[in-house]
């Protein structure tokens, strides 16, 4: 691993009332693992020996407000309990090439990248701060810096038994020369904090109900806004009668918002035409919205999702799909096969439905715009506001806040565009908060799909041919510049993933399902469905081959070797690391040990975002088609682990997210309308169905650290449906599970 | 006629639309933003508060029902710096992920423990129905048991 410090963009250190403030800007550390590290950090050490860290990454429940400070503090050698975390207001600019970027960081959260991108840069930041403090102490004591050490927030001169708290040195340290090259970092064996379990930094603020989230923010003189949009996708407004709405006490404005086509950058959800009601209070705004009379026109009224899926499926079966890739001689493998296994797997579209509904507080004046918003994409927020208001990016101030869940929804900035337009129209601060119904009907849904699998097994029980056809509502619909079928296929097919990629003769076909519903990234995009279908079908193949599901998987993975993996999460896929997590989960989960009738175990493993995860799930069937998830044992290899407690939390959360989704969630469209509107018809799992015995087992590793926000999710659904088969003999090939087991 | 109620021990009065849910009175008029909005239909529990000591979904409790009522929100749970045992248990077990649902969860659990100081897992399943989109249920269950133990310790 190499680090280069780019002196042109080097960090700034300043003294502010006796405190040392150190800012590591974007681009200061480049060429980590060959890629630019896109993070920025800001630390403040005050005379009372307290450290405040502002990080680039927005906290959405993935734990980075704890794990990134751990990296800094490890090298700074400071007490972690005197360290707190805050959000950063990023200065954003347009580069000479016209690209919008943050001067301090790219920020946000997505793709399970935060830890990988921060690992070296954050530790280097801590090391530089420590060096400046040691320089200051050396000068004060007139001793060579080489005679100094540090201990938990103090610089120590052992020979003269002197020590000084960092806080006392901070102001002077800020004036010392910044090291001109990368500093040596501690070897792994000397880590005191990295690799230890730390609790979430903001736990106390959360349990006392502090003002942490976007929806909690206020500004003096603020008004409240709600939106009314067409029930039918892509419909427009024919007529608005707002007289009754305006008569509601407290209603100040009724504003018609234009349809805005999506752009291919930050705001790739189209904004349908809509009406905003702005009032003194949220209640008045809601009452005003109820009193609105709007006639809608046009839209995708002919769309029924089941018919669209059936039509695409027919094309797929008829061989009309786009051939995405073909390797080896697939037809020959199938003609020579001793056995051919075929199955269809179906998954619906699903909504993000984060617990905190979409919201943005915006204030637009002649001087510029301020937006406070819970976002996974702060730079995109600035770009969107500049874009829809037609103002320079430098006039947009973005304040990020903790997000009440993200799951991908907050990568998109459509709610920000709306809030900015409303705020511009009314001239005072406005907080737009979507109702749950609005949130559910105005999402970028996870694509669903119908997957057609065929597998050829030779006489020796080896998988020799793999034929995977997918019909789906592509995630790239209306967002990728190229809307051709080959482009739409790229977010959907799993050509890089095992097991398919391990089969010598394989091919992948694709048919887009036509839909007006916007689609977007949802926790572990692409992997979330492919991880299920591939690993569930693989169980059927193992069964047909007469082999144990674990043994069959291990035989396929074969000897430990690195294979190319040429997409996000790559550049390599290690069969050995995948086999190791499968073995670990199996050993801890009592794989192969007998269970009473009605109980069963399933196993599955999947690689995504650079991390390897396998689960063994144990279920027991209950009368009436219910079942309990009695136990989940997980084997995880995500490289170097920064916060094992954080890994366990993400594992537990992703498992329950996958379970909740599999049990009952589906977004369907009838007459162009999303049929679900709130948790009454879009059921989210409650504690009674949850997996509450989850054991997270981590493979010790010195490989570069990788994220864990997403990778536990994809293999869970497969291990679950495989377990249901083991317990009941029934294959779940269509999600959600719903009443299928009754 | 004004509706008079106490919120976290303080007298408050409200003279607006009696249909307005308590949730918006708390959040928008009293700036008690620890009580969250999640669904507005009494489904998710993010808005859970105590009315006369019992857990209620504030999004579906109109102000008209609250004349003379005693309301407690998450902001009223700690005694000075001393957290309520359920809050403390939530920190001890590190329950929260995004944290958005957790104030409502804590209010629901405090109510459960007041009625049943030592609930079994089955009783927890039957009594708690607040949603957590982040899936913190494994730790949430541990948090309930931990809070039960803390409360017993406090009494002894
Ligand atoms: S907001 Fe009240 S139950 Fe969901
Ligand atoms: S912690 Fe995020 S919804 Fe419960």
Image (spheres, coloured by chain):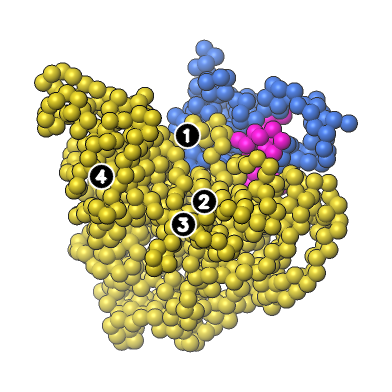
Chain colours: A yellow, B blue
Q: Nearer the viewer, residue B64 or A169?
A: A169
Foreground tag (4 vs 1): 4
Is the C-beta of the residue carrying label 2 under 8 Å from the nearest atom of ligand 2? no
Residue drawn at point x = 35 percent, y = 26 percent: A47
Secondary structure found at label 1: helix
Front residue of this view, candidates A371 and A120? A371
Q: Which residues are magenta?
A: B26-53
Q: Are marks 4 and 2 in contact (CB under 8 Å)?
A: no
Co-location on one chain, circles 4 and 1:
yes
Residue under label 3:
A379
Residue A522 seen: no
The chain to which mark 4 is attached is A
Mark 4: secondary structure: helix
Residue plotted at (61% across, 30% down): B74
Secondary structure of residue under mark 2: strand
Are the numbered discs 3 and 1 placed on the same chain, yes or no?
yes
Is disc 3 placed on a helix, strand or loop?
Answer: helix
From the image, tell me which residue sits under label 1.
Answer: A203
Residue A95: horizontal and vertical position, in percent? 40, 63
Q: What's the mark number on residue A126?
A: none
Residue carrying label 4 = A124
Residue located at (44% from left, 51% from top) = A91
Q: What is the number of the mark on residue A397?
A: 2
Please, is residue A508 above or below residue B29 in the view? below
Dot 2 alpha-carbon crowd within 10 angstroms: few under 14, some 14 to 19, many 20 or more: many
Q: Main secondary structure of the magenta part?
A: loop
User: Crowding near pointer 1: few (<14 within 10 Å), some, many (20+)?
Assistant: many
Quote the CA–CA distance across marks 3 and 4: 24 Å
Left or right: where does residue A223 sit relative to residue A170? right
Q: CA distance from mark 4 to mark 1?
A: 27 Å
Mark 3 or mark 4: which comes first in sequence?
Answer: 4
Closest to the camera, between mark 4 and mark 2, is 2
């Amino acid at each position: 691993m190499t680090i280069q410090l780019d002196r042109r963009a080097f960090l700034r250190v300043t003294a502010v009332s006796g405190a040392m403030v150190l800012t590591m800007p974007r681009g200061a550390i480049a060429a980590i693992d060959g890629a630019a590290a896109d993070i920025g950090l800001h630390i403040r050490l005050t005379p009372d020996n307290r450290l405040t860290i502002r990080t680039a990454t927005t906290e959405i429940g993935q734990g980075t407000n704890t794990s990134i400070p751990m990296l800094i503090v490890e090298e700074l050698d400071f007490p972690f309990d005197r360290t707190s975390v805050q959000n950063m207001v990023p200065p954003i600019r347009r580069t000479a090439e016209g690209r919008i970027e943050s001067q301090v960081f790219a920020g946000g959260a997505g793709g399970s990248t935060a830890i990988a991108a921060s690992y070296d840069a954050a530790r280097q930041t801590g090391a530089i701060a420590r060096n400046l403090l040691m320089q200051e102490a050396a000068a004060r004591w007139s001793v060579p810096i080489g005679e100094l050490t540090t201990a938990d927030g103090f610089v120590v001169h052992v020979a003269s038994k002197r020590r000084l708290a960092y806080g006392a040195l901070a102001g002077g340290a800020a004036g010392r020369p910044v090291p001109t090259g990368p500093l040596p970092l501690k070897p792994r064996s000397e880590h005191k904090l990295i690799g230890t379990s730390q609790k979430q930094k903001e736990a106390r603020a959360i349990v006392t109900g502090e003002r942490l989230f976007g929806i909690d923010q206020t500004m003096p003189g603020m008004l409240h806004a709600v939106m009314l949009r067409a029930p039918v996708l892509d419909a427009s407004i024919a007529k608005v009668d707002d007289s009754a709405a305006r008569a509601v006490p407290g209603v100040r404005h009724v504003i018609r918002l234009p349809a805005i086509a999506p752009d291919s950058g930050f705001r790739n959800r189209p904004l349908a035409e809509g009406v905003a009601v702005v009032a003194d209070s949220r209640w008045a705004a809601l009452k005003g919205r109820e009193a609105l009379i709007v006639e809608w026109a046009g839209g995708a009224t002919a769309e029924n999702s089941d018919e669209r899926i059936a039509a695409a499926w027919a094309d797929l079966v008829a061989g009309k799909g786009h051939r995405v890739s073909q390797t080896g001689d697939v037809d020959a493998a199938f003609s020579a096969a001793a056995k051919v296994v075929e199955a269809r797997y179906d998954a619906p579209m699903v909504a993000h439905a984060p617990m905190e509904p979409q919201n943005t507080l915006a204030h637009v004046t002649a001087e510029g715009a301020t937006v406070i918003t819970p976002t996974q994409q702060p730079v995109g927020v600035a770009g969107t506001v500049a874009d829809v208001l037609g103002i320079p990016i430098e006039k947009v101030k973005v304040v990020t806040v903790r997000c009440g869940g993200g799951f991908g929804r907050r990568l998109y900035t459509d709610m920000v565009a709306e809030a900015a337009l409303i705020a511009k129209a009314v001239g005072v601060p406005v907080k737009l908060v979507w109702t749950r119904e609005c949130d559910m009907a105005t999402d970028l849904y996870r694509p669903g799909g119908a997957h057609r699998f065929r597998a050829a097994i030779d006489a020796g029980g080896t998988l020799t041919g793999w034929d995977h056809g997918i019909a789906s509502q592509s995630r790239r619909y209306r967002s990728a510049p190229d809307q051709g079928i080959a482009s739409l296929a790229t977010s959907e097919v799993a050509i890089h993933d095992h097991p398919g990629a391990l089969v010598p003769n394989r091919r992948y076909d694709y048919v887009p399902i036509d839909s007006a519903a916007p689609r977007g990234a949802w926790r572990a995009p692409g992997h979330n469905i492919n991880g299920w279908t591939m690993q569930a079908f693989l169980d059927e193949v193992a069964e047909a081959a007469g082999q144990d599901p674990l043994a069959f998987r291990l035989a396929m993975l074969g000897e430990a070797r690195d294979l190319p993996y040429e997409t996000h999460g790559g550049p390599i896929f290690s069969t050995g690391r995948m086999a190791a997590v499968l073995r670990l989960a199996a050993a801890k989960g009592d794989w192969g040990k007998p269970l009473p009738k009605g109980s069963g175990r399933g196993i599955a493993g999947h690689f995504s975002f650079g991390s390897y995860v396998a689960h063994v799930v144990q279920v027991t069937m209950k009368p009436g088609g219910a079942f309990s998830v009695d136990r989940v044992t997980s084997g995880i290899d995500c490289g170097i682990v920064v916060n094992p407690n954080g890994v366990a939390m993400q594992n537990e959360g992703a498992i329950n997210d996958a379970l909740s989704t599999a049990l009952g969630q589906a977004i369907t469209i009838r007459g162009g309308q999303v049929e679900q509107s709130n948790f009454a018809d879009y059921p989210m799992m409650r504690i009674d169905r949850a997996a509450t015995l989850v054991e997270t087992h981590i493979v010790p590793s010195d490989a570069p650290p990788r994220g864990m926000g997403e990778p536990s999710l994809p293999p869970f659904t497969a291990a679950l449906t495989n377990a249901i088969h083991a317990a009941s003999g029934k294959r779940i090939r269509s999600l959600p599970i719903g009443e299928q087991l009754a | 006629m004004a509706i008079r109620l106490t919120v976290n021990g303080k007298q408050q009065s409200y003279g607006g639309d009696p249909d307005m849910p308590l949730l918006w009175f708390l959040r928008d008029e009293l700036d008690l933003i620890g009580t969250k909005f999640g669904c507005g239909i009494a489904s998710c529990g993010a808005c859970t508060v105590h009315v006369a000591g019992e857990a209620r979904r504030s999004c579906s409790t109109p102000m008209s029902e609250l004349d003379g009522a005693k309301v407690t929100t998450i902001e009223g749970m700690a005694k000075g710096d001393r957290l309520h045992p359920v809050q403390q248990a939530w920190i001890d077990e590190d329950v929260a992920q995004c944290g958005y649902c957790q104030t409502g969860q804590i209010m629901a659990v405090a109510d459960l423990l007041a009625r049943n100081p030592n609930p079994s897992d089955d009783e927890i399943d039957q009594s708690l129905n607040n949603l957590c989109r982040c899936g913190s249920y494994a730790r949430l269950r541990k948090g309930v048991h931990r809070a039960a133990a803390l409360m017993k310790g406090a009494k002894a």
